[in-house]
Amino acid sequence: MIVALVFEERPTTFPTAGVMSLAYLAFINTAVAYTLQNVAQKYTSDTHTAILLSTESLFAFIFGVFFYGDPFTPRILIGGLIVFSAVIISDLKWKNHPITNEAIETEIPNTESNDN
């Protein structure tokens, strides 16, 4: 953008549709959406909030394919499944394995000698 500001000519007029689109994005997506998100977060648990917020890319994909006409390819599907699986796995609460707990609780003897 800095390079464009230096080397390109500045527009003399701005199309009304472009200005209205920017105003919509600035107001609706920033002010209204974040306000609703913060208000809704008060009424749900941290885990549910994390899962809901992590589905943003999933909904962007769905709306992009159905409303914008983005291509639906196997590569996109596999990538989306990997990301979504990683989010779900990171939110799961894993049970501690008894062997791991025993290893943590036992002290490992110091094998270094202090002969100086």
Image (tube, helix red, strand yellow):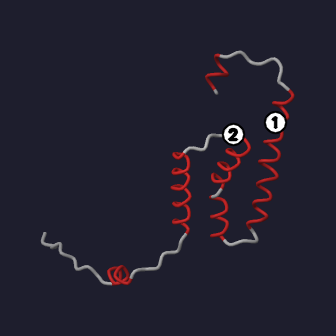
In front: 112, or 77?
Answer: 77
On screen, residue 38 versus residue 111, left or right, reads right
Question: Would you name the residue on which mark 2 appears?
Answer: 69
Question: Which of the 4 quarters of the picture holds residue 40?
Answer: bottom right
Point 78% across, 53% down: residue:
33
Question: Would you name the residue on which mark 1 appears?
Answer: 21
Point 63% across, 54% down: residue:
58
Where residue 77 appears, as percent x and y from the top left, is 55, 50
Q: Which residue type does callout 1 highlight?
A: Ser
Q: Which quarter of the image is occupied by the C terminus?
A: bottom left
Question: Which of the 4 quarters of the picture holds residue 96?
Answer: bottom left
Q: Which quarter of the image is occupied by the N terminus?
A: top right
Q: Give neighbour class at mark 1: few <14, some 14-19, many 20+ (Cα, 10 Å).
A: few
Q: Give neighbour class at mark 2: few <14, some 14-19, many 20+ (Cα, 10 Å).
A: few
Secondary structure, mark 1, is helix
Rendered position, 8 above or below 106: above
The CA distance from mark 2 to mark 1 is 19 Å
